[in-house]
Image: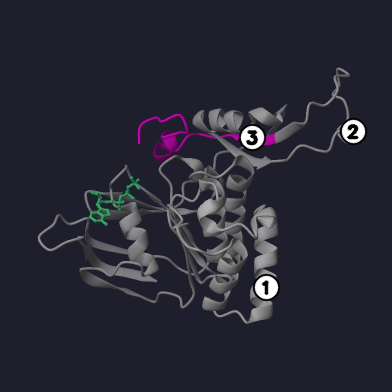
Amino acid sequence: MRLENVWLRYRRRGPWVLRAAGVRVGPGEVVVVLGRNGAGKSTLLQVAAGVLRPSRGRVTGRPRHVGWVPERFPADQPFTVERYLTAMGRVAGLDPAAAGRAVDHWTSRLGLSGFRRVRLPELSKGTAQKVGLAQAVLRPPGLLVLDEPWEGLDAVTRDLVPAVIDEVAAAGGSVLVSDHRGEIGRLSGARRWTVADGTVTASAPSADPALAVVEIAVPAARVDGTVARLRADGHQILRVRPPAPVGVVAPDDAGRPPTGAVDAGVAPVARAPEATGGITGGPR
Ligand SMILES: Nc1ncnc2c1ncn2[C@@H]1O[C@H](COP(=O)(O)OP(=O)(O)OP(=O)(O)O)[C@@H](O)[C@H]1O
């Protein structure tokens, strides 16, 4: 898919948000879209997804099936999670049986099984975001576009996002994902588009430094805070395991009983310049 000489402004005589943007993404490629707040990342993603039409220029070769995950899922819709997702599966071209299977799969995988009968406006922001992610991948998309998909998600689900992206790319889909918090460390091999002053600059993936993996255990109640601190320090979080049932986890080497511990895989990385805006709000 190519964006060819794309210009966009939101109103006549308004400022140009995109100026002569020209970038391409191929099948199986992942692109991380970077830029400071208000630079135009969402605008670029919406043009790529076909949500916004360029004021000038064109988008060619957009795959037929596009999955779009907006920054904020529009939860103000009078449906239950199950009815909404089933309908979205049908809109994506799945037959009723396939739509049902896809809804079962994704509600289970994203921890939404207990919310299937809940109406969208009653969901918490994070749960609604998961519904927003699920609807985009019910049918494997040829293009998956995610606008800050980590916002509002709990640590376990945040950890699933790179896995979902990898799966779409492995199946030959293209993926565009914006990231202003430097959460993207896990997507090694991703290309980068940087948006600044209306222009989009593409760059190749940076070479991965040698990594070591450190496993740690923390009380379950402190997982989110620990993950946030580690990310802010420039570490990648590879995996967050939910607490094992009491009685299953063995005491540690010092003979202390388990505390519902969660193991996080952590890999220290050389911080990419774009990834310095960590969870605790460094420079963006
Ligand atoms: N619907 C709209 N109408 C008018 N202007 C808009 C609209 N949406 C975005 N803009 C403006 O376009 C510019 C780029 O916004 P955009 O949301 O694309 O940036 P962004 O890089 O995604 O920002 P953030 O990181 O804060 O989400 C900003 O100046 C913004 O105010």
Three-letter residue code for mark 1: Gly
Q: Which amino acid type corresponds to the residue marked 3 in the rendered image?
A: Val
Splitting the image into 4 quarters, where does residue 154 fall? top right
Left or right: residue 211 compared with residue 132: right
| Quadrant of the rendered image containing residue 60 | bottom left
| Mark 2 neighbour class, 10 Å CA radius: few under 14, some 14 to 19, many 20 or more | few
Residue 213 in sight in this render = no
In what element is the residue under mark 1? helix
Q: Nearer the viewer, mark 3 or mark 1?
A: 1
Residue lying at the far top of the rendered structure: 254
Q: Are marks 1 and 2 in contact (CB under 8 Å)?
A: no
Quarter residue 88 falls in: bottom right
Seen at 25% across and 68% down, the residue is 54
Q: Which residue is mark 1?
A: 100
- Distance of label 3 from label 2 (alpha carbons): 26 Å
Residue 238 in the image: x percent, y percent?
64, 42
The quadrant of the picture occupied by the C terminus is top left
How many marks on residues? Answer: 3
- Inspect the magenta stretch and tell me whether residue 171 lies in it: no
Residue under label 2: 247
The label number, if any, that marks residue 139 in the structure image:
none
Task: Determine the secondary structure under disc 2.
Answer: loop
User: Residue sitting at 64 percent across and 32 percent down?
Assistant: 223
Identify the magenta region. Answer: 264-284
Which residue bears the numbered disc 3?
Answer: 266
- Tag 3 and tag 2, C-beta contact below 8 Å: no
Tag 2: amino acid: Gly
